Amino acid sequence: MHILMITDVYFPRVNGVSTSILTYRQALISMGNKVTIIAPDYDTVTDNEKDIIRIPSRHLLIEDEDKMMKAGHIYKLIDELALMDIDVIHIQTPFVAHYVGVKLSNILDIPRVESYHTFFEEYLYNYVPFVPKSFMKSLARRFSTAQCNNVDAIVVPSTAMLKALREYGVDAKAEIIPTGIDLDKFNSGDGQAFRKKHGISMDRPTLVHIGRVAHEKNIDFVVEMLAEVKLQIPDVLLIIAGQGPAENHLHKLVERLGLVDNVKFIGYLDRNTELKDCYCAGDIFVFASRTETQGLVLLEAMALGVPVISTAVMGTRDILLEEMGSIIASEEKADFSQKVIKTLQDNEMRGALSVEARVYAKAWSEDRFAGRMFDFYHEIIELHALQGSDEIAVSEIID
């Protein structure tokens, strides 16, 4: 099968969508499929640019890290794409990629599937603060409904996300297919080496948060919770790895709460090397995002044997099972901080959670979910062919 993925974001731009696309791409190729990606040109290249078509792009005013593809350059490729024997178009993002993907699907008569990666209702208003929150949430719902109902099928990573879309009025065919993880890559890391490099004592109680440093990730709550932990464990350290638009705000919050010596901002880390070491440098992985449609970082932490303490909201509800490598906390500083304190102080408990985490993560293999995605593609391709046959039959009767 030849899959064409169209996306507004991909490596070297680091985020959950890029990770999901890369994971599926690798797994589908290993199954014998061909995957071509149309993505923005970031003026730098990745380690593997094979079958990636980079499109000239312009910077966005509201987000320096992202770029917007120039659609006209994609339409110039139509004749070339028509010769590629593409079986299905998988639209990964709702901006230029969506509208281009729909148009290519219509012109080339190829079925289109779209993934709903981002909970826009709880996302957009963070980046347009001068517009009322209620208006932006309503706009996000209408925007999502129109797009999801304009494809052959949608893929969502969690039960909660599909429920929300159905409540919006999305009636398109849908399948819940999370993104798995590459268990061969996330099987070991050198936490001691990471601590040594960054001047962290080997016995210092350490929490880790990895992910895009964005407002919707609710890192404010994690920092405020840390202040409660510090009251009982004064030398506790929180590592925040990643970059994003909330960095300046978080630095100011850390200073205001008197946590400068308790928080270390690391920035982006190489996914294949130091990122895994960073996970393993933590005694606990902490997370409190309200907008995750899945939460791959939780699975990556557990695959490396790092216990997780997290809220269970939206997509994280489908991942987290109490005491299967994780502890679920409410978004209340007292509850979350006490669970962190108890886990930091109980070595035996952490050890048991670590073992459980590794076992549990094995159920989230990328190959398992890539197989489900392949079957879904096949189903949509067959439905598209049947619909085409029905149209031909009707036209023959009319003639």
Image (tube, rainbow, N blue to C red):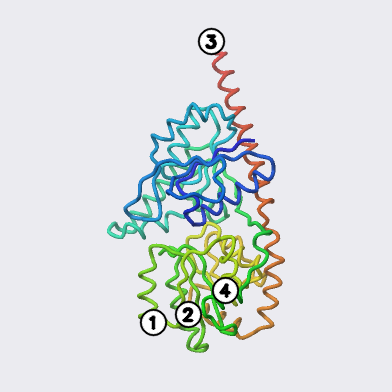
* Quadrant of residue 306 within the rendered picture: bottom right
**First reached walking from the N terminus: tag 4 or tag 3:** 4
Q: Residues within 10 Å of mark 1 (few under 14, many from 20)?
A: few
Identified by mark 3, the residue type is Asp
Identified by mark 2, the residue type is Leu
Tag 4 near tag 3, CB within 8 Å:
no
Mark whose residue sits in front, 4 or 3: 4
Which residue is at 52% across, 88% downward?
Answer: 233
Res. 194 mark: 4
Mark whose residue sits in front, 2 or 3: 2
Tag 2 near tag 1, CB within 8 Å:
yes
Residue position marked by numbered label 1 in the rendering: 257
Which residue is at 48% across, 76% downward?
Answer: 332
Residue position marked by numbered label 3 in the rendering: 399
**First reached walking from the N terminus: tag 3 or tag 1:** 1
Residue position marked by numbered label 2 in the rendering: 226
Q: Nearer the viewer, residue 333 or 203?
A: 203
Residue 138, image x, y percentages: 37, 52
Q: CA distance from mark 4 to mark 1?
A: 26 Å
Q: The residue tagged with tag 2: helix, strand or loop?
A: helix
